Image: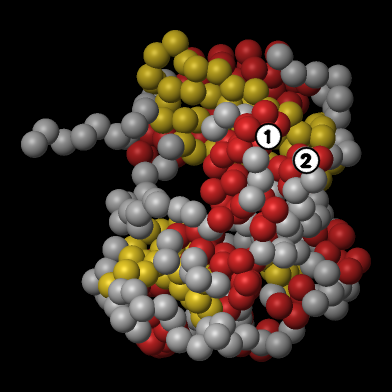
Amino acid sequence: MPDLIDGEAPARTRWVLHVDLDQFIAAVEVLRRPELAGLPVVVGGRGDPTERGVVATASYEAREHGVGSGMPLRTAARKCPEAVFLPVDAPEYDAASAGVMDTLRSFDVPVEVLGWDEAFLGVDTDDPVGFAHDVRAAVLDATRLHCSVGIGDNKLRAKIATEFGKPRGSFVLTEENWFEVMGERSTDALWGIGRKTAKKLAELGITTVAQLAAADTAALAGRLGPTMGPWYRRLGRGADTSPVDPTPYVPRGHGRETTFQENLTDPTAVDREAERLARKVLEDVRAEGRPAVRVGVKLRYAPFVTTTRSLTLPGPTLEEAPVVSAVHELLGRLDRERPVRLLGVRLEMAPPVEPDP
C-alpha cells in the first residue's frame, strides 16, 4: 500500500499520527519464539483450543484462514487446525507496550495512549510522511516490533488511515482526499460506527459514508437521538476537533471474569465463584488506593447469551462485606435457573483526588 494518494501531503504543519502495532500480541510471542515466524499463531485463553476461550489475537498467517479476535478458540482450531495456540501472557504484553510508548515519547510530542498497541501523536511538521517513517524505524529499532502509521489532519482521519497503511506502512487521509478514499465505503468503515448502528442507518437508506455526510440531520436525530444523530453525520464528513491528550491513563475500575469449562448449573456454585472474583477485584482496587463506588456483574448463559447488571454502593468503600453483598443482590436480579458459562465482576472506583496546588 503506498504512503499517499495523489502525491504529496497537503500544505499544513499540524498533524495527528495514529501508531498501531502490527499483530501486536502475536508479534510479541514470535519474538519470544523465533521458530514461530511465518506460522499461523493464535493467542487466547490458556492456549488450549479444546477448552472454552476466545482468540485475543491471530497472526496474519492465521487470519488468512479466517481466524479473528473474539472468535471461540474451538472455532479457530476448526478453521486453522495447523495453528500454534498460545496462552495469554498479559505481563509480557505490558512490558512490550511500555517499551513502545517510551519510544514514542522520545520524539518529544504529545502522546495519547489508547491501549497496549496504539497511540495518537500530535505533530508539528511539514513532512508528516518522513516523520511517520522515523517513528516506524525507531519503534522497530527499540522493540523489534513493526507498526503502521495513519496520518491525518485530525484524530478520526488518522485512526482510519492506519488501516490503509497496514502492514508496516503509512497512509495520509485528510479533508482533501476524504471522499475519494471513504465516500463509497460502507458506514461501518468509520471509527465509531458498528454493525448495529450501520443497520439503523441502512433503514434510513444510508449505506455509504458519502450518503451519511449528506444526510438530513433531523432524520438522523429522529432515528438515532438528538445528540448521536448529528454526531454520526459529522463522522461521515470526517470531522473531529478532539485534541491529542497526553494525560496519563487513569483506570475507572477493575474487573475479572472466568469462563467455565463446564457450565455451572448450581446457583450456589455461581455464588461461590462470584464471591471469589469479587475478592480478587477488591484486591486490585485496594492496590489503586481508590475506593469502590459501583459494582457490576456479568453472566453469560449457555449457549452464548450475555446479561449485565450494576448498582451504586451506599458509599465509597474498600471493605469486603458491602461489595460481596452487592454482588449477591445483583445475582438475585438475574435468572438463576439457566446454565452459566461465564461470570464476571467489576468494581468502578472513585476518581483520583487532585493534589492541592
312 horizontally vs 100: left or right: right
* Residue 324 image point, x, y percent: 55, 20
- Image quadrant in which the N terminus is located: bottom right
Question: Do the residues bearing badges 2 and 1 touch, measured as CB atoms within 8 Å?
Answer: yes
> What residue sits right under mark 1 in the picture?
219
x 34%, y 74%: residue: 12
* Residue 216 image point, x, y percent: 65, 40
- Image quadrant in which the C terminus is located: top left
- The secondary element bearing badge 1 is classed as helix
216 horizontally vs 172: left or right: right
What is the basis of the colouring in this image? secondary structure
Residue 190 position (above or below residue 336): below
- The secondary element bearing badge 2 is classed as loop
> What residue sits right under mark 2 in the picture?
204
Q: Nearer the viewer, residue 190 or 357?
A: 190
**As shown in the figure, which amino acid type bears the numbered disc 2?**
Leu
x 77%, y 53%: residue: 207
**Distance from the alpha carbon under mark 2 to that under mark 1:** 8 Å
* Residue 39 image point, x, y percent: 74, 84
**As shown in the figure, which amino acid type bears the numbered disc 1?**
Ala
